Image (cartoon, grey):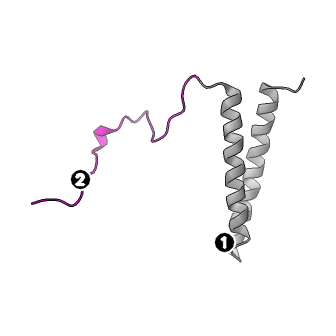
Amino acid sequence: MIKDSPNPPSPQDFDPSEGLFNVRANLGMETLLVNASQDLASISDIATHLAFEVDGAPRNVALGICRMLEGVQLLVDKALNKTNPAA
């Protein structure tokens, strides 16, 4: 009998120490923080857009996500300023 799809991978096919995505070991702290900052800004834009597309409880959830992202963004910005202070 011919199957339409392959067998799913078995658990032993995955190394538990590796996730779906990995970060290269040789990246510097500034590179990591800059990329994290840009990702947070993108996620914040998505959540803000969503907040103005929905009403009621879903809007409150989206706005809550925006506020949490702003707090994390401040932490990343502070860390970035400490690793590369302005001259």
Helix, strand or loop status at disc 2: loop
Does the stretch in magenta take in 14? yes
Give the side of residue 24 with respect to residue 71, left or right: left
Decide which of tag 1 and tag 2 comes sooner along the chain.
Answer: 2
Residue 64, given in percent of the width and then of the height, sits at 73, 61
Residue 57, given in percent of the width and then of the height, sits at 68, 74
Q: Which mark is residue 84?
A: none
Q: Residue at x 77, y 25 (%)?
A: 83
Residue lying furthest left: 1
Q: Quadrant of residue 32?
A: top right
| Contact check, label 1 and label 2, Cβ < 8 Å | no
Span colored in magenta: 1-26
Residue annotated with mark 2: 6
Q: Quadrant of residue 61?
A: bottom right
Give the side of residue 24 with respect to residue 6, left or right: right
Q: Amino acid at mark 1?
A: Pro
Residue annotated with mark 1: 58
* Mark 1 and mark 2: Cα distance apart in space: 38 Å
Q: Residues within 10 Å of mark 1 (few under 14, many from 20)?
A: few
Q: Residue at x 90, y 23 (%)?
A: 87
